């Protein structure tokens, strides 16, 4: 006689291991959030998983959940882990064609403003902040501008305030600068000290660096330009929508939004509030 129940087969070992790993990651991210307020819970899963696995190798941890007692009992362990979870990668005039488009299409509007507020969200080590400062200086509008540069990574902000980078990458930066429409000799903007290039302190005279978490913090001013490039690619759809709303709430009418090349406003519920200045360069203007 056929038994009156369904046969339950044991779960596949790989599937079980994967679900356990995901649970460990969720528990770790929840512990970081509840204990310290850093919220990685809505970061894209594959991205945050790769970074956690890399952190395990670097920090000598055998299990993902093994991080939890380490960070709860020793905040220094948290900061070691954060350095490995937070992506701080950028370069001066990254995507030069965008900066060229900004110079040609956005600067004419900014010239008409009595005062210009620019927010660089997720500014990393300040490379793009310096790029903007130089561009505004060359276009003669820097003295009426204020750049607010924010990031979650305090270590990156410290480096950004110093305005000092390895001399070995200056050639790459100089090429980007020329492609972005730079009008001078790029070497005029820095001095060489040993193997470091130190940018002129006057370039940062109108820059305010501060800690800000796009995941948990709110709008803190109204801006004519918001630049957040190659940051939201690490967020899931829910968090992307949250950050898009934050930018919309922070952007003045007819203000400009600049995103990274893999990013777009099209997935945002309020995307019809923007018109593209250049869709390819992910440069938009708020119209509603």
Image (tube, rainbow, N blue to C red):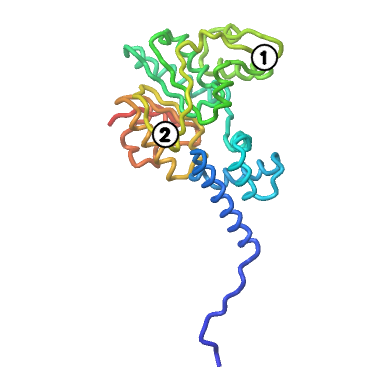
Q: Which residue is mark 1?
A: 196
Q: Is residue 245 above or below residue 251?
A: below
Which of the 4 image quadrants contains residue 253?
top left
Q: Who's the residue at 42% across and 34% down the image? A: 217
Label 2 near label 1: C-beta < 8 Å? no
Q: Is residue 41 above or below residue 185?
A: below
Count residues near mark 1 (Cα–Cα under 10 Å), then give few for <14, some for 14-19, many for 20+.
Answer: some
Residue 120: x %, y % from top left: 46, 24
Q: Which residue is more in the foreground, 58 or 224?
A: 58
Q: Who's the residue at 60% across and 41% down the image? A: 71
Quadrant holding the N terminus: bottom right
Q: Which residue is more in the foreground, 131 or 85?
A: 85
Query: Considering only order in the chain, which callout, 2 or 1, is on the residue closer to the N terminus?
Result: 1
Query: Which residue extends farthest left?
Result: 288
Identify the secondary structure beneath mark 2.
loop
Residue 186: x %, y % from top left: 58, 10
Q: Which residue is mark 2?
A: 217
- Label 1, label 2: how many angstroms apart (C-alpha)? 34 Å
Q: Who's the residue at 52% across and 17% down the image? A: 131
Count residues near mark 2 (Cα–Cα under 10 Å), then give few for <14, some for 14-19, many for 20+.
Answer: few
Q: Which residue is more in the foreground, 6 or 177?
A: 6
Task: Determine which of the numbered discs, if any, sits on residue 228 in the image.
Answer: none
Residue 101: x %, y % from top left: 45, 21
Quadrant holding the C terminus: top left
Which of the 4 image quadrants contains residue 216?
top left
Q: Is residue 94 left or right of residue 240?
A: right
Identify the secondary structure beneath mark 1.
strand
Q: Is residue 220 above or below residue 271?
A: above
Q: Is residue 66 left or right of residue 211?
A: right
């Amino acid at each position: 006689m056929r038994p009156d129940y369904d046969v339950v087969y044991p779960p596949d070992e790989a599937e079980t291991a994967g679900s356990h790993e995901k649970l460990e990651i969720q528990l770790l991210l929840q512990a970081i959030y509840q204990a310290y307020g850093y919220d990685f819970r809505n970061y894209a899963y594959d991205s945050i998983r790769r970074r956690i696995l890399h952190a395990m190798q670097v920090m000598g941890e055998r299990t993902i959940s093994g991080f939890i007692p380490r960070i709860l009992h020793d905040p220094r362990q948290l900061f070691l882990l954060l350095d490995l979870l937070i992506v701080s990668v950028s370069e001066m005039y990254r995507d030069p064609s965008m900066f060229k488009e900004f110079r040609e299409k956005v600067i004419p509007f900014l010239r008409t403003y009595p005062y210009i507020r620019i927010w660089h969200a997720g500014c990393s080590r300040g490379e793009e902040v310096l790029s903007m400062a130089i561009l505004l200086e060359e276009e003669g509008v820097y003295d009426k501008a204020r750049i607010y540069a924010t990031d979650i990574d305090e270590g990156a902000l410290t480096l950004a305030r110093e305005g000092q980078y390895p001399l070995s990458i200056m050639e790459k930066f100089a090429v980007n600068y020329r492609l972005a429409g730079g009008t001078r000799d790029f070497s005029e903007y820095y001095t060489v000290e040993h193997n470091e290039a130190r940018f002129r302190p006057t370039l940062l005279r109108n820059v305010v660096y501060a800690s800000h978490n796009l995941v948990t913090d709110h709008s803190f001013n109204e801006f004519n330009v918001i630049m957040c490039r190659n940051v939201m690619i690490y967020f899931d759809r829910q968090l992307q929508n949250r950050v898009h709303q934050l930018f919309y709430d922070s952007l003045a009418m007819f203000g400009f939004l600049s995103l990274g090349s893999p990013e777009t406003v099209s997935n945002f519920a309020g995307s019809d509030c923007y018109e593209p200045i250049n869709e390819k360069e992910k440069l938009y203007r708020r119209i509603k």
